[in-house]
Image (cartoon, rainbow, N blue to C red):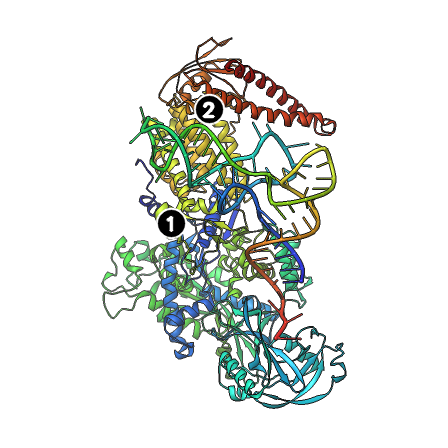
RNA sequence: GGGCGUAUAGCUCAGCUGGCUAGAGCACCUCGCUUACACCGAGGGGGUCGCGGGUUCGAGUCCCUCUACGCCCACCA
């Protein structure tokens, strides 16, 4: 082993080994209780940042701990298509001002390409943190299975009357060219100018003079004596766009104290004005278009952007003498959280999820609302939020929840599955199940040869086909399609006979043409070729991926009504799944292994949504809007587990256990998952929400590009190692609070990791030649008993802490146990002699204890000591070696050794100088004395009745009783100083104790045991004071 | 405007249901390259726990007021 731990030499290789082992894949058939965390999917376009790193560290620790305590763990990975964010990034990348500058198909192709590359980057970055994710179950919020789920939810909500289309006031992001939800609006205080404008005989004030072109109502408070009598009257006044007629309207909304107490309203461009207009039945005048430019009603400003129009309108009004006063005015401006542009409130037709409309819950039969279901989760205690205070935040959000606008005018998102006919009637997409099945075994299959296309089914293969037919008979199949190859066709014949259904041969469902390889024995090389993404040899042959994608498209578009079964091949099923998961493949073979059919006759159910146009002659027009990205994210805990189809994953792993994420997306995401999860399945999708805080710099300041205080987790991992980065993100912070982090802190934990490495190195040196099988956990010597006891305490603390999601406490306990107890005292004691078999045994337990927090170093060290293994598969330590006697005896030794060290430091006596010491008044013999001698660097420790008279020497009163005499030349002045200091401290202590006991209320009311303890302490302090005083007196 | 949080050593923070002399890491000072580790070891200095009240035998810990900072929600032109 090297002198220092070089993380770079081990981490990547170790992760690759975990992946290759297949152990990261959760087993749905396991008997063990499940523990499931859905990973908050990072945006495909993003880079790993410290927020992700914190999330990965926390979740990985929980996953590993649960795995080690008897759970079948599943940590579901994936990425998010991040609709608006991604669309913007791609648009900028392509240099498009507006997305319409490129045809939709082309834009989507570019976006997919970009997302695919970005996906691989972020996935690899996640692996750097050591995350024990089940990559075989990776999914993507924009893949085909998610699309099917999204459509299923949409349909269900629609049928329950919970999705409506409505013409309402919405937030328009001019830059994104889309509406955004209320929650997606960010507010920023800006100082702008408040203009006071003459309007007929009145003065009104506004920060948006450009909108004062086509108003028709002047609103005043109905109680305002200045204006009360004018309500109902009409007058004409000049605006910058010409003369207009105004009505005077009375509405409570107006604050008489503000400005002149009167204002004119922009009914179509302000939520409050809109509300007033609705109350008074006023017309809605569109002044700003969706392009962010003024409409024709703006006269001289028509066609200008809002900001340009503002300048121009003010100039015009100044000219006209309409501007009475200008003042600077700080107020909040709504901004788009994705593009940062100013939000324009607009009236528009959009789709909404209505949250307060009663419906019948199909799981309980009760009448309820989405709002109710969402609130009940936390109110009823079925979902617990950590830290608890966020429950209040959650409630206040729910209580004020309004309808959720889910339509977006961007391209990069799930299409809203609605089609309109000429009469404006609404048609839904058609959900279809496709059973993609594998043929029975052929003779070539049996011989493990590459297929020659023409070998018949074996007897076993025919039996498999019969079984398959039985299975399909349960599924109400109305159409049967088969690949043209013989083994498939023969299977189809058997199925066809059973179902009484004709079959159609579709060439596209054949597997790839393998040319000259036909009939060859299968080899590894051949497999690799078989699964290659791009095929280069034989330029006429399409790549596998292209071919299957084509077949998939054929299926999706030409299928007719009813359920379809397609008899095809294993590779086809694999490829279809890959494509459905939108995973351009980094390692096709690995994915094929995870997703390929296991056996002949297996059935894979796929959901697809078809256009209703397939079923009608009437021309239909597809809705062009897409869905809010959070609409699909809300399905994250259900869809990747198999909803709506169900299946063994869903049965075993739903609901999940913990949802861990940043508190900033509690509303956006967590609340919506709770809402949809409960609505769709009748169960809340997880029982615990763990919210971590914002990762900030070492000074507690928010990291930002402009401040330049950002830290790149990958750089930190490269420099200090993933284990150190994990610890620094997890120790010393509390859920929900900021997580301060800086290179110094990470460096500190790197030192800890190195300490552990060196402990192992030491153990290795001491145990060379000892067989692992000889290792024992049964302590014998005092030091062994002591450390066993301390380990037991630490282990229980860590276990309790992790069970209660107190990761920081677990980390802190580990840090101090390993460093301050195990290394500083036990390994030092071991230098006095310890049984290698115990050293070896306990070291292993320490590695297991630390493993959930530091997977890399612990597994690496385990390999060094005992040979390659997977610690996550081992049991979390459960020693029961608590030993009060050993702890008391060892504490005495520690006190003695510390006293000697203090004297040494005071007098400048180096550790190499052996000191003769005498001890009286306390029992410290045998093992204890030996330990004291070794740890204190003593020549000999003599235990005596009365201390010998020396002409020089330092006497120290030990905390555990007893007096230690150290034979060492000393400086009388220094000794006086030391003793005076000690006396002062003792006096202070005595004062406190006496004061407490002097209070009769204390002795009466405090628990008797505590009072007795205080008395004992006072006695001890008094005794010590007497001795120290005597010593001090001797010195004069 | 409403709500929440935080104020503990020079810095960043622990301190669970109130109970021994308030802790850690980093920084600082002194000493030491003692054969696991200088990414180390030994010792040390440093805090009236934001202010003021209250409850209690006892408060950093519970309650109230105030002050400062931070966050979330609302959004009167």
Q: Is residue A616 visible?
A: no
Q: Is the residue marked by circle 2 packed among few (<14), some (14-19), or many (20+) residues within 10 Å? A: some
Does A285 sit left or right of A438 as displayed? right
Q: What secondary structure is found at the residue carrying circle 1?
A: helix
Pick out the residue farthest to the front: A1036
Asked where in the image residue A319 lies, by quadrant, the reply is bottom right
Residue nearer the viewer, A489 or B34: B34
Q: Percent from the top left, x then y, of residue A341?
A: 49, 71
Q: Which residue corresponds to mark 2?
A: A898
Q: Is residue A80 visible?
A: yes
Q: Are marks 2 and 1 in contact (CB under 8 Å)?
A: no
Q: Percent from the top left, x then y, of residue A722?
A: 39, 46
Does A454 sit left or right of A202 as displayed? left
Q: In percent of the image, x 41 and y 31: which residue is there?
A: A843
Q: Is residue A948 above or below residue A362?
A: above
Task: Point out the frontmost of discs 2 and 1.
Answer: 2
Q: Percent from the top left, x then y, of residue B13?
A: 52, 45
Q: Is residue A398 above or below residue A201?
A: above
Q: Is residue A342 above or below residue B39?
A: below
Q: Which residue corresponds to mark 1?
A: A716
| Between discs 2 and 1, the one toward the N terminus | 1
Q: What secondary structure is found at the residue carrying circle 2?
A: helix
Q: Is residue A197 above or below residue A257?
A: below
CA–CA distance in space, label 2 to label 1: 37 Å
Q: In percent of the image, x 29 and y 57: which residue is there?
A: A528
What is the number of the mark on residue A404? none
Could you confirm whether marks 2 and 1 are on the same chain? yes
Residue nearer the viewer, A497 or A22: A22
Q: Is the residue marked by circle 1 packed among few (<14), some (14-19), or many (20+) residues within 10 Å? A: some
């Amino acid at each position: 082993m090297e002198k220092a731990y070089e993380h770079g030499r081990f981490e990547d290789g170790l992760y690759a080994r975990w992946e290759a082992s297949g152990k990261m894949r959760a087993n749905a058939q396991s008997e063990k209780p499940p523990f499931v965390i859905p990973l908050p999917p990072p945006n495909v376009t993003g880079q790993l940042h410290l927020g992700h790193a914190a999330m990965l560290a926390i979740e990985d620790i929980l996953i590993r701990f649960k795995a080690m305590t008897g759970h079948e763990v599943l940590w579901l990975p994936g990425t998010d298509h991040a609709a608006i964010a991604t669309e913007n990034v791609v648009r900028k990348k392509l240099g498009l001002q507006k997305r319409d500058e490129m045809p939709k198909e082309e834009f989507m192709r570019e976006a997919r390409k970009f997302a695919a590359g970005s996906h691989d980057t972020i996935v690899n970055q996640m692996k750097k943190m050591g995350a024990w994710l089940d990559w075989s179950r990776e999914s993507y919020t924009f893949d085909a299975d998610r699309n099917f789920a999204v459509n299923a939810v949409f349909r269900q909500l629609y049928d329950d009357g919970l999705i409506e289309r409505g013409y309402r006031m919405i937030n328009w992001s001019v830059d994104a060219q889309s509406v955004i939800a209320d929650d997606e609006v960010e507010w920023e205080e800006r100082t702008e100018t408040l203009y006071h404008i003459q309007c007929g005989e009145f003065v009104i004030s506004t920060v948006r003079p450009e909108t004062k072109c086509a108003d028709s109502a002047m609103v005043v408070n109905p109680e305002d004596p200045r204006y009360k009598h004018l309500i109902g009257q009409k007058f004409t006044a000049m605006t910058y766009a010409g003369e207009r007629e105004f009505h005077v309207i009375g509405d409570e909304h107006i604050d008489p104290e503000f400005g002149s107490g009167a204002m004119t309203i922009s009914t179509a461009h302000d939520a409050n004005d809109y509300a007033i207009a609705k109350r008074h039945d006023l017309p809605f005048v569109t002044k700003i278009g969706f392009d962010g430019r003024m409409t024709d009603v703006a006269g001289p400003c028509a066609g200008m952007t809002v900001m340009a129009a503002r300048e121009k309108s003010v100039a015009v009004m100044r000219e006209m003498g309409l501007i009475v006063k200008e003042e600077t005015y700080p107020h909040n401006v709504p901004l788009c959280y994705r593009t940062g542009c100013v939000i324009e409130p607009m009236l528009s037709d959009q789709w909404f999820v209505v949250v307060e409309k009663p419906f019948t819950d199909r799981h309980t039969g009760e009448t309820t609302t989405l709002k109710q279901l969402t609130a009940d989760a936390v109110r009823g205690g079925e979902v617990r939020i950590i830290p608890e205070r966020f429950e209040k935040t959650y409630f206040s959000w729910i209580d004020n929840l309004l309808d959720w606008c889910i339509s977006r005018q961007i391209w990069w998102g799930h299409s809203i599955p609605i089609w309109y006919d000429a009469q404006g009637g609404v048609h839904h997409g058609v959900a279809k199940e496709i059973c993609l099945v594998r043929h029975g075994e052929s003779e070539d299959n049996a011989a493990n040869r590459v297929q020659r296309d023409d070998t018949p089914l074996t007897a076993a293969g025919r039996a498999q086909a019969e079984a398959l037919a039985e299975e399909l008979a349960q599924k109400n199949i109305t159409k049967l399609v088969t690949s043209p190859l013989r083994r498939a066709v023969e299977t189809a014949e058997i199925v066809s006979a059973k179902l009484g259904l004709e079959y159609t041969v579709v060439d596209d469902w054949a597997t790839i043409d393998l040319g000259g390889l036909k009939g060859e024995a299968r080899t590894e090389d051949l497999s690799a070729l078989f699964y290659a993404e791009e095929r280069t040899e034989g330029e006429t042959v399409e790549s596998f991926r292209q071919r299957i994608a084509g077949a998939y498209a054929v299926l999706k578009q030409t299928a007719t009504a009813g359920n379809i079964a397609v008899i095809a091949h294993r590779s086809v099923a694999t490829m279809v799944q890959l494509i459905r998961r939108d995973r351009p493949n980094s390692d096709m073979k690995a994915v094929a292994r995870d997703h390929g059919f296991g056996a002949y006759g297996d059935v894979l159910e796929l959901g697809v949504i078809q256009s209703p146009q397939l079923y009608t002659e009437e021309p239909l027009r597809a809705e062009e809007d897409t869905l809010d990205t959070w609409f699909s994210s809300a399905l994250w805990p259900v869809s990747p587990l198999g909803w709506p189809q169900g299946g063994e994953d869903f049965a075993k792993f739903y609901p999940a256990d913990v949802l861990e994420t940043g508190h900033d997306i509690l509303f956006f995401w967590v609340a919506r998952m709770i809402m949809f999860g409960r609505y769709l399945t009748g169960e809340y999708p997880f029982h615990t929400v763990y919210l971590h805080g914002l990762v900030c710099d070492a000074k507690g300041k928010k990291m930002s590009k402009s401040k330049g205080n950002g830290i790149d987790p990958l750089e930190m991992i490269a420099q200090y190692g993933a284990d150190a980065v994990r610890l620094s993100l997890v120790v010393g912070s509390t859920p929900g609070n900021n997580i301060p982090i800086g290179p110094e802190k990470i460096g500190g934990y790197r030192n800890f990791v190195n300490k552990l490495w060196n402990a192992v190195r030491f153990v290795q040196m001491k145990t060379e030649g000892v067989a692992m099988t000889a290792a024992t956990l049964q302590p014998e010597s005092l030091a062994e008993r002591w450390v066993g006891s301390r380990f037991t305490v630490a282990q229980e603390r860590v276990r309790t802490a992790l069970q209660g999601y107190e990761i920081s406490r677990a980390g802190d306990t580990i840090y101090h146990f390993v460093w301050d107890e195990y290394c500083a005292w036990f390994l030092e004691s071991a230098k006095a002699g310890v049984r290698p078999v115990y050293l070896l045994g306990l070291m292993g337990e320490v590695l297991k204890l630390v493993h959930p927090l530091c997977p890399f170093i612990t597994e690496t060290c385990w390999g060094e000591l005992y040979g390659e293994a997977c610690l996550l598969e081992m049991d979390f330590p459960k020693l029961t070696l608590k030993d009060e006697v050993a702890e008391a005896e060892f504490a005495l030794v520690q006190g003695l050794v510390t006293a000697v060290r203090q004297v040494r430091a005071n007098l400048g006596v180096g550790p190499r100088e052996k000191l003769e010491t005498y001890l009286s008044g306390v029992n410290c013999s045998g093992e204890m004395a030996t330990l004291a001698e070794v740890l204190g660097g003593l020549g000999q420790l003599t235990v005596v009745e009365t201390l010998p008279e020396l002409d020089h020497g330092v006497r120290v009163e030990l905390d555990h009783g007893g007096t230690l005499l150290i034979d060492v030349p000393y400086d009388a002045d220094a000794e006086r100083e030391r003793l005076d200091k000690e006396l002062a401290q003792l006096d202070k202590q005595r004062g406190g104790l006496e004061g407490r006991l002097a209070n009769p209320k204390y002795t009466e009311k405090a628990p008797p045991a505590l009072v007795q303890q205080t008395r004992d302490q006072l006695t001890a302090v008094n005794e010590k004071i007497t001795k120290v005083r005597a010593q001090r007196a001797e010195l004069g």
